[in-house]
Image (cartoon, rainbow, N blue to C red):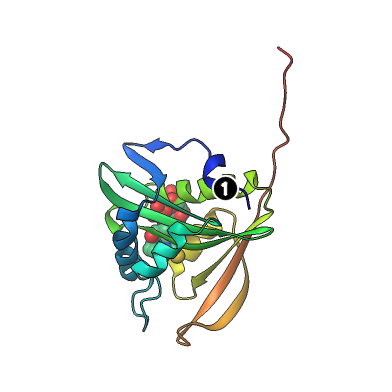
Amino acid sequence: MKNQYSILPEFSNINGIHIDIARERDIERIGVLSKKLIEVGLLNWVWNPQKVAEQIHNQDSLVLVAREEQELIAFVITEFKKNTANLVLLGVSSNYQRLGIGSRLVKILEQSAAALSLTSIKLEVRSENRSARTFYKKLGYKEVRVIRGYYSNHEDAIQMTHRLSYEPATFSSQ
Ligand SMILES: CC(C)(COP(=O)(O)OP(=O)(O)OC[C@H]1O[C@@H](n2cnc3c(N)ncnc32)[C@H](O)[C@@H]1OP(=O)(O)O)[C@@H](O)C(=O)NCCC(=O)NCCS
């Protein structure tokens, strides 16, 4: 696997919110946000700081964060497989939702996956998480199957996928 950090599209600012690669100092905060925003009500804390740290150190994973000044307000974890990128975890802090930050993070990971010649993005979302299912559908993701008891044998997952399309490069001689 190529080093995905070297081919990331240019990071951007959305109204003072800066998108960046996650650092060691972000590990704890990502774990806490995961527990609060995504794993709420589940028996085990799967995305605890140790698991987040493994992803940050994994050459085949990409962990992006959004910050306002020094405060980490959103994150996305993606694992790059042979043909597919697995969007593992995405969270935007409650006060910053509906500002386009989640969409921007997903677009950046899609561009990174496309640059690695991957063909699709896959993810699992809690079946009861209607807002996230609506969010991903808005971004063109399709619900493909239900995985029974995926979350601690307690809740089903909906698997969603998105095919990446490639714009042919255009060159000008001028
Ligand atoms: C789901 C989540 C990542 C969306 O991030 P976000 O930055 O708020 O989303 P965006 O602002 O980019 O939203 C883009 C579009 O998605 C849809 N959408 C987003 N949140 C929605 C909600 N709560 N209800 C309905 N539609 C929603 C809307 O169509 C929205 O466009 P609009 O605001 O112009 O109507 C965020 O709400 C979140 O972190 N939720 C808790 C954690 C979670 O569920 N993570 C996903 C599973 S891992």
Left or right: 114 with respect to 20? right
Residue at position x 34%, y 79% in the image: 41
Above/below status of 32 relative to 156: above
On screen, residue 54 versus residue 172, left or right, reads left
Secondary structure category for the residue under label 1: loop
Q: Residue furthest bottom?
A: 153
Residue at the top extreme? 174
Q: Quadrant of ligand 1?
A: bottom left
Q: Position of residue 122 (x, y in %)?
A: 60, 63
All told, the count of numbered labels is 1
- Locate residue 19: give its quadrant: top left
Q: x%, y% of residue 38?
A: 38, 69
Which one is in front, 17 or 137? 17
- Sort mark 1 into few (<14), some (14-19) or many (20+) by Cα contacts within 10 Å: few
Q: Is residue 97 visible?
A: no
Is label 1's Cβ within 8 Å of ligand 1?
no
Question: Does residue 137 appear to the left or right of 155 in the view shown?
Answer: right
Say which amino acid is labelled 1: Asn
Q: Say which residue appears at 30% left-offset and 51% top-offset.
A: 72
Instruction: From the viewer's side, name the closer residue of 101 and 18.
Output: 18
- Residue 53 position, x and y percent, is 39, 63
In which quadrant will I find the C terminus? top right
Q: Where residue 84 sits: x, y (%)?
A: 65, 59
Q: According to the image, label 1 marks what residue?
A: 3
Residue at 39% over, 55% down: 75
- Left or right: 160 as drawn, with respect to 33: right
Q: Is residue 17 visible?
A: yes
